[in-house]
Image (spheres, grey):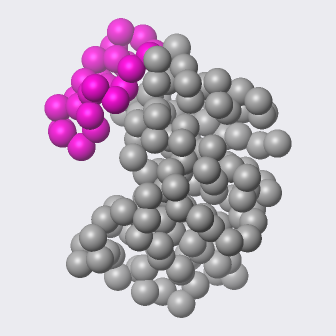
Amino acid sequence: MLEIGVKKGAGLSAWLEYWPNTQFVVIDNFMPEAAPAVLKHPRVVWKQADSRTVEVDGQFDLVIDDGAHDPDCQRLTFENLFPSCSGRYFIEDVFPLDDMSGAQLAKREQWFAKGWIDRRLHTRVAYDRLLESISRYKVTRHDLRAGRSADSFLFEVTR
């Protein structure tokens, strides 16, 4: 499994428990002193790198992009890493601008206010480029927004 973005390591800790025989490669660009302890697990290989340009060895049954959360980064990461995916590729925390109500768009503003997602990067043009890039493949949309935050939306991409 390849995971892009690890933050505090809660997701990776869950994956390690859920799949006890799986090897994990984790890519994130944070500084080593901020690295969560879970990255020292014997089944984890951590690469401090930019997911848009990093080179990876081998094929992955599952890729989860939970990284930068902006459409251009999600697109460039997909274009870089999807060739190494032999199974399912998930793009988490998508703001589906073609399918958001006014209330959901207002919730999206809360994410911008927190400061870790840049409003300037979330344009319809950037989102459409992401859609164009993944549309050559089978795309399943997973809408988890009911009762959750505006970013609770996933794209699942397979060949």
**Quarter location, residue 43:** bottom right
As for residue 103 lying within the magenta part, the answer is yes
- In the displayed structure, 137 sits above or below 12; it is above
Image location of residue 70, percent across then percent down: 41, 36
Which residue is situated farthest in the bottom direction here? 42
**Residue 45 in view of the camera:** yes
Image location of residue 91, percent across then percent down: 56, 43
- In the displayed structure, 5 sits above or below 107; it is below
**At 41% from the left edge and 41% from the top edge, which residue is drawn?**
69
Which residue is situated farthest in the right direction here? 159
**At 77% from the left edge and 43% from the top edge, which residue is drawn?**
158
From the viewer's perspective, is 73 left or right of 136? left
**At 42% from the left edge and 79% from the top edge, which residue is drawn?**
39
**Quarter location, residue 111:** top left
Instruction: Please give the range of residues in magenta.
Output: 100-124
Image location of residue 114, percent across then percent down: 18, 39
Q: Quadrant for the N terminus, please.
A: bottom right
- 24 or 12, which lies in front? 24
As for residue 31 lying within the magenta part, the answer is no
From the viewer's perspective, is 126 left or right of 106? right
- 148 or 80, which lies in front? 80
**Residue 18 in view of the camera:** no
- 37 or 83, which lies in front? 83
**At 48% from the left edge and 86% from the top edge, which residue is drawn?**
41
Q: Count of labels shown?
A: 0
- Which secondary structure dominates the residues rendered in magenta? helix
Which residue is situated farthest in the top direction here? 102
Q: Quadrant for the C terminus, please.
A: top right
- In the displayed structure, 79 sits above or below 60; it is above
